[in-house]
């Protein structure tokens, strides 16, 4: 599993195209982020990212992200 840190630039697939943005934080416990409930743990983290294009936030599993 690839690890990311706050401030890392990443890209991901979004609605048939590629989006780029920045990692805001690593999520390692169940919480509410980006308008939804996120199920995460230290063994299965998720990442809160901000899109450069829209400024919106989203949560992604590490396998959905690539370094930009």
Image (cartoon, helix red, strand yellow):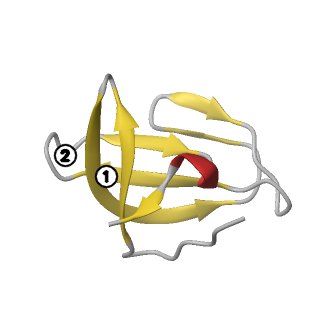
Q: Position of residue 52 (x, y in %)?
A: 18, 53
Q: Which residue is nearer to you in this view: 20 or 56?
A: 20
Label 2: few (<14), some (14–19) or many (≥20) C-alpha neighbours in 10 Å: few
Mark 2 to mark 1 CA distance (whole Å)? 6 Å
Would you place residue 65 above or below residue 22 in this image? above
Mark linked to residue 55: 2
Residue at left offset 54%, top offset 72% = 4
Q: Which residue is nearer to you in this view: 47 or 17?
A: 17
Upstream in sequence: badge 2 or badge 1: 1
Badge 2 marks a residue whose secondary structure is loop
Q: Position of residue 43 (x, y in %)?
A: 86, 60
Badge 1 marks a residue whose secondary structure is strand
Residue at left offset 82%, top offset 63% = 42
Would you place residue 60 above or below residue 35 in this image? below
Residue at left offset 38%, top offset 37% = 13
Residue at left offset 51%, top offset 65% = 25
Answer with left or right where residue 62 lies relative to residue 65: right
CB within 8 Å, label 2 to label 1: yes
Q: Position of residue 15 (x, y in %)?
A: 32, 23
Total tally of numbered discs in the picture: 2
Residue lying furthest right in this view? Answer: 43
Would you place residue 30 above or below residue 24 in this image? above
Circle 1 sits on which residue?
A: 50
Q: Where is residue 34 in the image (x, y as percent from the top left)?
A: 45, 37
Q: In which quarter of the image is the N terminus?
A: bottom right
Using the rendered view, name the quadrant where residue 23 is placed: bottom left
Mark linked to residue 8: none
Would you place residue 44 above or below residue 56 in this image? below
């Amino acid at each position: 599993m690839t690890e990311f840190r706050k401030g890392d630039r990443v890209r991901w697939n979004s609605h048939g195209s590629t989006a780029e943005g920045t990692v805001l934080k690593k999520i390692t416990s169940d919480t509410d982020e980006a308008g939804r409930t996120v199920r995460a743990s230290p063994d299965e983290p998720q990442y809160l990212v901000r899109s450069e294009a829209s400024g919106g936030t989203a949560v992604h599993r590490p396998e959905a992200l690539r370094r930009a």
